[in-house]
Image (tube, helix red, strand yellow):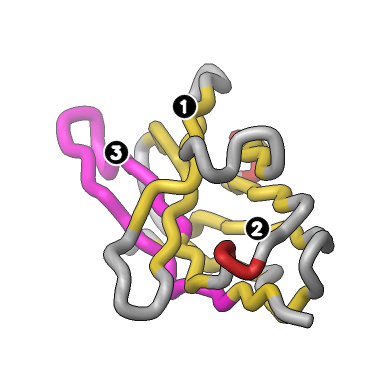
Amino acid sequence: QVQLVESGGGLVQPGGSLRLSCAASGTFFRIYTMGWYRQAPAKQRELVATITRDGSTNSADSVKGRFTVSRDSAKNMVYLQMNSLKPEDTAVYYCNALIGTNLFARDNYWGQGTQVTVSS
């Protein structure tokens, strides 16, 4: 059974920083792309940033230059460094990972979400 567990959310003032972490645990063959999505109240879940096994990244235009996604493949972890936070970044942030449970099967997994609130 595969689990993704996020940590690091909280309340921060505009202009501040937070670092989210996500750890994958369980039995699996390989972790492929990892990343972060977010969902604000009354809005659809949206991509924030992703990172492949070889370190290639992709991020939403709204966070470019402010957020940085990284991973530690040896520890099965992905991180999101968020700087210059704005009130519109307020959302529940979800960790996501494409994980191969064996050589032939890949499934998409989600964490339980962590709340990020940007407010003065």
| 98 to the left or right of 60 | left
Residue at the spot of label 2: 21
Q: Which mark sits nearer the N-terminus, 1 or 2?
A: 2
Distance between the Cα atoms at labels 3 and 1?
14 Å
Q: From which residue to which does the magenta span run?
A: 95-115
| Dot 1 amino acid type | Thr
Residue 47's x, y, as percent? 39, 47
**Disc 3 element:** strand
Give residue 100's mark.
3
Q: Is residue 76 above or below residue 56?
A: below
The quarter in which the N terminus is drawn is: bottom left
The answer to which image quadrant residue 76 occupies is: top right
Residue at the spot of label 1: 52
Identify which residue is drawn at 27% across, 44% down: 101
Q: Do the residues labelled 3 and 2 touch (CB within 8 Å)?
A: no
**Disc 1 element:** loop
Residue 49's x, y, as percent? 50, 41
Q: Which of 35 and 22 is in front in this view?
A: 35
**Disc 2 element:** strand
Distance between the Cα atoms at labels 1 and 2?
16 Å
The quarter in which the C terminus is drawn is: bottom right
Give residue 60's mark.
none
| Dot 2 amino acid type | Ser
| Dot 3 amino acid type | Gly
| 103 to the left or right of 9 | left
Q: Is residue 99 magenta?
A: yes
